Image (spheres, rainbow, N blue to C red):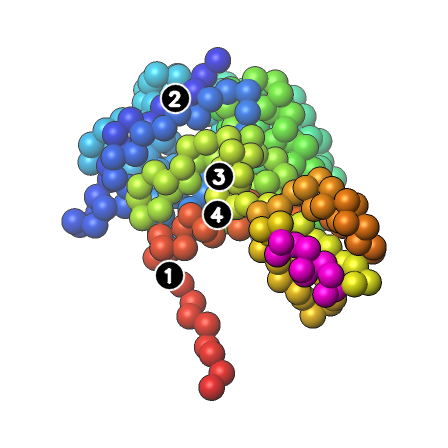
């Protein structure tokens, strides 16, 4: 199947490096999340892969060929970079029909993707009347039009309602299960965690991580256990004696860092300490991502501290 291969890719704009010596491969059969702070180089990289910009050096290929050299590219690569790209005076159906005609795709495929994206009832309305979520669905319909082996989506959940977000998750998982290559750029960490198998993370134009999602989280954030008891003094003493680092919260619960529920439960059971609550606080993608990229953001907000 078709993969996306980026090798030693560099792009400079007037002396400013947008991406610098990037090398990674996006493989078929899985959803790859493409993450990074604003200014990290994600959009530039996607534009280079799609032939919309030319690299200063290095290569970006799809199935071993640069995008501009692909025959009937819509049949090979489907992409959504801008949900507002459709002509506002056209109907949704006419927008897709024009794309289909340029790539020798039959009209019946237009109707199929309209149904698949939930836009069939609005197909004959002009794009100017569409909400942001509807324009997003139209962009996804255009990306799927050629039944491509490779799908690149930039912020596909933007503007979607809760039902739409569930739909896009299922769509991405299905595309990967069919053996397609799926690359999704997003700023929504919880959403990315719900669909991604693998992560590529950029910071200031450089590659920071290229790893399975679970490995990325577990390498950067240690687990914690949450405990509540009727005997706080005894619990505090017991945890300290066994080398656990614990913090007592305002809600009466203790957070035990770098601990698993099984380990804490065994200690408490052996000592006969009464337990009201014992739960695992799992590490999240957001925690791991912020830990990695905190020094890589181009734009950050400073928190005001009260005197």
Going from N to C along the chain, the mark reached first, 2 or 4, is 2
Q: Which residue is pictured at 65% across the width and 36% down the height?
A: 169
User: Which numbered disc covers residue 289?
Assistant: 4
Q: Quadrant of residue 119?
A: top right
Residue that badge 1 annotates: 299
Q: Main secondary structure of the magenta part?
A: helix
Between circles 1 and 2, the one closer to the viewer is 1
Between circles 3 and 4, the one closer to the viewer is 3
Give SS at disc 2.
strand
| Magenta residue span | 232-241
Residue that badge 2 annotates: 62
Asked if residue 86 lies left or right of residue 204, the reply is: right
Nearer to us in this view, 40 or 244: 244
Q: Position of residue 90 (x, y in %)?
A: 56, 43
The Cα atoms of the two marked residues, 4 and 1, are separated by 16 Å
Residue that badge 3 annotates: 219
Crowding near pointer 4: few (<14 within 10 Å), some, many (20+)?
many
Nearer to us in this view, 17 or 230: 230
């Amino acid at each position: 199947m078709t993969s996306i291969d980026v090798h030693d890719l560099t792009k400079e704009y007037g002396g400013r490096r947008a991406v610098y010596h990037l090398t990674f491969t996006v493989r078929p059969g899985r959803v790859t999340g493409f993450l990074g702070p604003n200014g990290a180089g994600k959009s530039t990289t996607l534009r280079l892969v799609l032939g919309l910009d030319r690299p200063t050096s290095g290569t970006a290929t799809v199935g071993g060929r640069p995008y501009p050299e692909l025959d009937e590219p819509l049949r090979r690569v489907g992409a959504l970079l801008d949900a507002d790209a459709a002509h506002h005076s056209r109907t949704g159906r006419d927008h897709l029909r024009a794309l289909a005609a340029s790539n020798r795709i039959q009209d019946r495929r237009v109707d199929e993707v309209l149904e698949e994206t939930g836009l069939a009832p609005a197909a004959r309305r002009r794009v100017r009347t569409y909400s942001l979520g509807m324009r997003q669905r139209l962009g996804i319909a255009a990306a799927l039009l050629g039944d491509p082996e490779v799908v690149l989506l930039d912020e596909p959940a933007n503007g979607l309602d809760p039902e739409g977000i569930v739909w896009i998750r299922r769509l991405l998982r299905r595309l990967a299960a069919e053996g397609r290559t799926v690359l999704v750029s997003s700023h929504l960490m919880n959403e990315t965690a719900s669909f991604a198998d693998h992560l590529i993370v950029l910071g200031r134009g450089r590659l920071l991580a290229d790893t399975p999602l679970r490995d990325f989280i577990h390498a950067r954030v240690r687990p914690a256990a949450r405990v509540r008891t009727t005997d706080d003094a005894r619990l505090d003493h017991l945890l300290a004696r066994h080398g656990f680092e614990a913090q007592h919260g305002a809600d009466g619960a203790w957070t035990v860092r770098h601990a698993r529920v099984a380990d804490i439960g065994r200690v408490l059971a052996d000592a006969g300490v009464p337990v009201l609550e014992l739960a695992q606080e799992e590490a999240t993608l957001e925690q791991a991502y912020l830990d990695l990229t905190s020094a890589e953001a181009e734009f950050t907000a400073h928190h005001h501290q009260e005197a």
